[in-house]
Amino acid sequence: MNDTNEFQSDNLQRFIFDNAPVRGEWVHLTDTWKDVLSRREYPPAIEHLLGEMMAAAALLTATVKIKGRLVLQLKSTGPVTLMMVECTSNNTLRAFAQWDGDVEDDATLMEITGEGALAITIDVEGAKQPYQGVVSLQGESISEVLESYFKQSEQLETRIWLAADSQSAAGLFLQQLPGESHHKEADEESWSRLSQLASTVKNKELLELGAGTLLHRLFHEEECRLLSTTELRFSCNCSRERVADTIGLLGIDDANNLLQEQGHIEVACEFCNEHYQFDQVDVAQLFSGQLNSNSDSKIVH
Ligand SMILES: [Zn+2]
């Protein structure tokens, strides 16, 4: 029996347990992941990490019920210098990584990142300031890093399992919810039982099995109930206007220097690799607009 053909990928499945205050999520990405990989070729170790980060971003976004976006951003001394994954409440994902130099195929997390940190930003639409949590990159895997983030920030027992290859990215998430105080001991016991059962999951199972089959395999003696599913897809919301804003931030002198060197300014979106070109007329227009809007609010000497 080939299970791979029997479930819908690019989906997130929520589940709960009837007999324990524990919630869970399963995610599996195929087309979404291949869309990211079609835009840039990555060394295998970086591809692996980026896939795991994609699955993690989807799992984390589903835990925060917000309208907006969640961004996982990894910054390190290298070879990976920057890795960004964004998941929105419209169920879209996009991701990219930048790196310097060679990376061994079987490089560990520490070998890929050296010293660094993972920032988790939650940008709620209409909020003045985004929420940001930062955790240092310590541990053998990104799931370990995220587990310690949850321990520090939410003080909720959380376990995360992630897997990725060149075809799929997948993950499993389990979190203990606050229960009633007189059930504390029983709740602790069920958490340790459920998280132990889940920790028998193998990467191959995450990558190849659908939620129903996998959860039955892990929790067949538990009362595990499937809740809602969410379909996910790749999408990038970059636009010519946003790129123009970025050029505006350069200032007119730097923009003109670039024009002189290259004849035009070309900017590629890191996420989707779309190229935007601005010629002399575009740039002149851009800054004349900026000058006009500035003169409204600033005193020009
Ligand atoms: Zn884009």
Image (cartoon, helix red, strand yellow):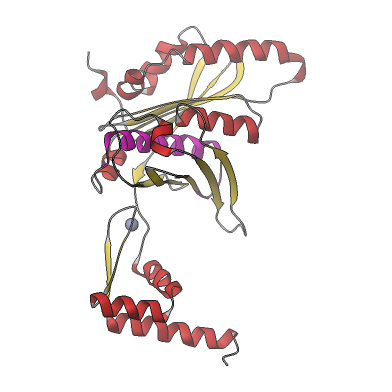
Q: Name the foreground residue: 97 vs 204.
A: 97
If the image is split into quadrants, where does the C terminus sit?
bottom right
Q: Residue at x 29, y 35 (%)?
A: 30
Looking at the image, residue 286 lies above or below residue 113: below
- The number of numbered badges drawn on the structure is 0
In the picture as drawn, the residue positioned furthest to the top comes out as 221
Q: Residue at x 34, y 68 (%)?
A: 240
Residue 19 visible in the current orientation: no
Q: Quadrant of residue 162?
A: top left
Looking at the image, residue 65 lies above or below residue 148: below
In the picture as drawn, the residue positioned furthest to the right comes out as 182
Is 259 displayed left or right of 76 in the figure? left
Is 153 displayed left or right of 79 in the figure? right
Residue 162 visible in the current orientation: yes
Q: Residue at x 45, y 35 (%)?
A: 56
Place of residue 145 in the rendered image (x, y in percent of width and height, measured from the top left): 52, 31
Looking at the image, residue 221 lies above or below residue 77: above
Q: Name the foreground residue: 49 vs 261.
A: 261
Place of residue 73 in the rendered image (x, y in percent of width and height, measured from the top left): 47, 46
Is 64 displayed left or right of 248 in the figure? right
Residue 61 covered by magenta stretch: yes
Q: Name the foreground residue: 132 vs 187.
A: 132
Residue 125 covered by magenta stretch: no
* Magenta span: chief secondary structure: helix
Place of residue 29 in the rendered image (x, y in percent of width and height, measured from the top left): 33, 34
If the image is split into quadrants, where does the N terminus sit?
top left
Q: Which residues are magenta?
A: 42-69
Q: Residue at x 47, y 15 (%)?
A: 199
Place of residue 49 in the rendered image (x, y in percent of width and height, measured from the top left): 37, 35
In the picture as drawn, the residue positioned furthest to the bottom comes out as 301
- Quick check: which quadrant has ligand 1? bottom left
